[in-house]
């Protein structure tokens, strides 16, 4: 079944002898795929034929129905707004010599993903593979969970290995709703990422002290070094590098990649926090009975707020991860795990110079992100 990657155009093209116009009905919904046309479309589009041909573009309309609001919960719950997939049905009614014909058989159960294709991928990019990420080498913090996004419909199994020993096997599920078509396969229970979150999730109290930190620095809690994926594209082997970072605080960025899946990317090295303020000023009349107080401000602030930003350094990544950084820069939705909260950020860099091991030896990327909200809460 073909897919609609809604950040790229999706064209519906057809032609017929003496075609004068056509109506396209589009129904967008969650839950399970329909087996027959249900009516009640969200959109009804009409177009006049040119040379007996008509083309509709529908991706932008579908995109509005995919919330993609990540709250740190990969598995997702109904109504949480973290879905990056949606079902689409459509049917066409042609007008031949201005006479309406019987509607064509509807197209049912098209899967819409919050993804995109590159120009060289051509029109209506599909990306029908099982593994929903481009890199096969994954770097992660040694105490944090590994999650691999796969398309449940196009994947058979995912095996996690440690030192050659198989420790967990996931197999494709049946009877899934559209919101669960992307599976984030992990050895972690629920959505806990690290030791601290596992303690809290189990109802315990996490005591942060030097002894605990020393323990965490010397133990790899999620000991996975290889993942084997069986999917429609064949067998793919992922190499996992568990990075122990003792000096700096690693930060995890989560972004929607080109396949429409949430993908984690760790920034391991030095980070710097900065703040920029903005203000609106006005001049006040402080004159009173022909005089004024020198301690009264003539130039006053109407509003003042600020935006904080982080400068992050990735640490040394293999050249094969350049594509991941490319997709991070192209993503319009990015989040950071910061002080135990999932916060939305914007990538402030406007360009990226791809680095190679031949010319740069060690590949490190510096990324500037700004928090996607004002520092002073002004939500009214």
Image (cartoon, rainbow, N blue to C red):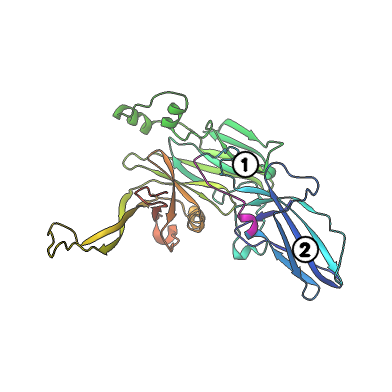
Left/right of residue 346 with respect to residue 75 in the rendered view: left
User: Farthest residue toward the bottom?
Assistant: 51
Examine the image and state in which quarter residue 102 appears.
bottom right
362 lies above or below 226: below
Q: Nearer the viewer, residue 360 or 125?
A: 125
Q: Could you tell me residue 117's position as x and y percent?
A: 61, 59
Q: What residue is shown with label 1?
A: 229
Pointer 1 or 2: first along the chain: 2
Q: What residue is shown with label 2?
A: 23
Q: Could you tell me residue 340's position as x and y percent?
A: 40, 38
215 lies above or below 254: above
Instruction: For mark 2, give the secondary structure.
Output: strand
User: Farthest residue toward the front?
Assistant: 289
Is 68 covered by the magenta stretch?
A: yes
Instruction: For mark 1, give the secondary structure.
Output: strand
Q: Can residue 31 be seen?
A: yes
295 lies above or below 21: above
Residue drawn at (39%, 24%) of the image: 205
Left/right of residue 314 with respect to residue 9 in the rendered view: left
Work out how far the residue at label 1 is from the one at label 2, CA to CA, in angstroms.
Answer: 43 Å
For disc 2, the neighbor class at 10 Å (few under 14, some 14 to 19, many from 20) is some
Q: Nearer the viewer, residue 195 or 176?
A: 176
Left/right of residue 225 with respect to residue 307 in the rendered view: right
Segment colored magenta: 61-72
Q: Could you tell me residue 11's position as x and y percent?
A: 70, 63
Is 71 covered by the magenta stretch?
A: yes
Q: Could you tell me residue 3's position as x and y percent?
A: 69, 53
Q: Nearer the viewer, residue 89 or 218?
A: 89
């Amino acid at each position: 079944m073909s897919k609609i990657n809604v950040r790229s155009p999706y064209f519906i093209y057809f032609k017929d002898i003496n075609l004068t116009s056509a109506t396209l009905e589009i129904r967008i919904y969650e839950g399970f795929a329909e087996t027959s046309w249900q009516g009640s479309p969200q959109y009804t589009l009409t177009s006049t034929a040119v040379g007996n041909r008509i083309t509709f573009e529908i991706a932008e309309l579908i995109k509005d129905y995919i919330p993609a609001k990540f709250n740190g919960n990969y598995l997702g719950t109904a109504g949480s707004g973290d879905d990056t997939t949606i079902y689409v049905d459509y049917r066409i009614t042609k007008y031949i010599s201005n006479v309406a014909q019987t509607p064509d058989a509807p197209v049912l159960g098209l899967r819409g993903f919050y993804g995109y294709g590159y120009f060289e991928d051509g029109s209506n990019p599909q990306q029908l593979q099982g593994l929903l990420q481009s890199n096969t080498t994954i770097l992660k913090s040694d105490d944090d969970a590994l999650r691999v996004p796969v398309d449940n419909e196009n994947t058979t199994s995912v095996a996690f290995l440690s030192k050659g020993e198989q420790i967990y096997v996931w197999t494709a599920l049946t009877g899934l709703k559209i919101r669960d078509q992307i599976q984030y396969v992990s050895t972690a229970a629920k959505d806990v990422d690290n030791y601290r979150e596992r303690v809290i999730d189990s109802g315990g109290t996490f005591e942060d002290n030097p002894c605990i930190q020393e323990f965490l620095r010397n133990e790899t809690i999620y000991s996975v070094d290889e993942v084997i994926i069986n999917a429609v594209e064949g067998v793919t082997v992922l190499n996992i590098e568990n990075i122990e970072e003792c000096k700096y605080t690693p930060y995890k960025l989560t972004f929607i990649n080109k396949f429409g899946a949430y993908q984690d990317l760790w920034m391991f090295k030095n980070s710097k926090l900065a703040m920029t303020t903005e203000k609106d000023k006005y001049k006040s009349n402080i004159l009173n009975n022909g005089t004024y107080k020198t301690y009264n401000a003539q130039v006053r602030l109407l509003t003042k707020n600020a935006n904080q930003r982080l400068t992050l350094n990735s640490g040394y990544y293999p050249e094969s991860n350049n594509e991941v950084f490319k997709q991070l820069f192209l993503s319009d939705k990015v989040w950071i795990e910061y002080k135990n909260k999932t916060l939305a950020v914007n990538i402030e860099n406007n360009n990226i110079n791809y680095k190679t091991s031949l010319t740069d030896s060690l590949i490190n990327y510096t990324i500037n992100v700004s928090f996607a909200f004002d520092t002073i809460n002004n939500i009214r």
